Amino acid sequence: MDTYDVIVIGAGAVGENAAAIPAQRGLRVAIVESHLVGGECSYWACIPSKTLLNPGRILEFARSNPATRSAVTGSLEPGSVFRRRDEMVSEWDDSSQADWVADNGIELIRGHARLAGERSVAVTGDDGRTKPYRAERAVIVATGSEPVSPDIEGIEDITTWTSRDLTGATEVPARLAIVGGGAVGVEMAQAWAWLGSEVTLIHNSERLLAAEEPFVGEEIARALRESGVRVVTGADTKRVRPVEGGAALEVDVAGEIEEIVVDEVAVAAGRRPRTDDLGVESVGLSPGDPLEVDDHMLVTGVGGDWLYAVGDVNGRALLTHAGKYQARIAGAHASGVAGAAVDAIPATPRVIFTNPEVAAVGLTEQQAADAGISVDVVTHDIGAIAAAGTLGEGYSGTAELVIDRCGGVVVGATFVGPQVAELLHSATVAIVGRVPLRRLWHAVPAFPTFSEVWLRLLESYRDAGWDPYAP
């Protein structure tokens, strides 16, 4: 039986980070992958989705500025967009990622891994043979998540697009329905509308991006409609059936059944942790459930302090950067750094790369109230910032800070507008560092940049009664 100090299951971006830390500290590390090294983010999610979105965003920026508008004489050429996407995902060839693994002193094992008891992993290769491995220190699970199929009558009778099809397709459907109004749904609705598809976005909630502040969903719905997307909210998709050349969806909208006929149906209705075929029952856990973890990323309910879970598979935050952060914690702790633990302050940044962008971090006003924090909320029109005018005409957007009234610190921030994602890290630093507002008052923003909105937000708070000079 081959033995390593640490075995990582899953060689996506999160698993790579989990493996790199103990390898850098001189431990013997193996990483197991059944598909492409680099995982979902590299080939089917973050990278291809943003590559599909950015051409349309650039085109809209050019059209918004009178100085460049006349230079825009046509629309996007889908073939060129797809070719650039294919380049960015290395034509779905993971050779360079595999080289990175080897260059970092990590052994790559190809095959499907399952837990086989304490510190044991069984890997089945393409030849069908299964080989046992043992981890002296730790096994780190980084198997990610998979799409959830909604409970819609007839859904099994048609071929649906998943998030992978939305980012990997090579032809533009004339009519596309997307079921789900979360991050994947809104981003891909806009991307495919820009590519020339007649897109209908169907969401069962009254508000898109319902986990964010209420104004976010309203502003994104308006932007999607301006991009040509038909947005149907508060809609319950009752049934799907195949028709010639496509599918028909029967949708209940305010008590009225409407039939929507399309060429393709994409499902973006959430994801679940990939634990069904992981062998978790061998250590007393239930297949299909998320692997709940403590702040060291150790899986709870499993004795011996040897099993870790990072990224989507633990259900904490289904975001690549959040998973990579967790992976660094787990990798350090598994290497013997006893103090390695995630921070207690909830400050995971999140970005929706539509136009306008949505950038948020920390708590929403409702989440803060649920946590028993007494807060003040200040907002400002980003379109009133001088930088907005330099970008182009018609800029609109909103900035909001959620402020802990007693602590005098920011606990949440949300920005909606073109190019606001670059404002997010300053907000993250303010929240994680618990920077007092009276110190932020002296953080002078450069002019004319979008960061000036920080000053305007603090001025609004001052005008509401806060004294930046009080002792």
Image: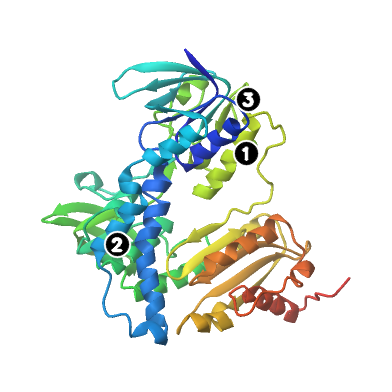
Instruction: Tell me the crowding category of disc 2: few under 14, some 14 to 19, or many 20 or more residues within 10 angstroms, Cα based.
Output: some
Q: Which type of secondary structure does the marked residue at label 3 adopt?
A: loop
At x 46%, y 32%, the residue is 102
Instruction: Tell me the crowding category of disc 1: few under 14, some 14 to 19, or many 20 or more residues within 10 angstroms, Cα based.
Output: many
Q: Quadrant of residue 437?
A: bottom right
Marks 3 & 2, CB-CB < 8 Å contact: no
Determine the CA span between mark 3 and mark 2.
Answer: 47 Å
Q: Which type of secondary structure does the marked residue at label 1 adopt?
A: helix
Tag in front: 3 or 1: 1
Q: Is residue 278 above or below residue 461?
A: above
Residue reaching furthest left? Answer: 244
Q: Position of residue 415 (x, y in %)?
A: 56, 68
Whether residue 409 can be seen here = yes
Q: Which type of secondary structure does the marked residue at label 2 adopt?
A: helix
Marks 2 & 1, CB-CB < 8 Å contact: no
- Which residue is disc 2 drawn over? 81
Q: Is residue 198 above or below residue 289?
A: below
The amino acid sitting under disc 1 is: Ile
Q: Position of residue 461 (x, y in %)?
A: 71, 76
Determine the CA span between mark 3 and mark 1.
Answer: 14 Å
Give the mark nearest the N terminus, 2 or 1: 2
| Quarter in which the C terminus is drawn | bottom right
Q: Position of residue 291 (x, y in %)?
A: 52, 34
- Which residue is disc 3 drawn over? 305
Determine the CA span between mark 2 and mark 1.
Answer: 37 Å
407 or 243, which is in the foreground?
A: 407
- Which residue is disc 1 drawn over? 329
211 or 131, which is in the foreground?
A: 131
The amino acid sitting under disc 2 is: Val
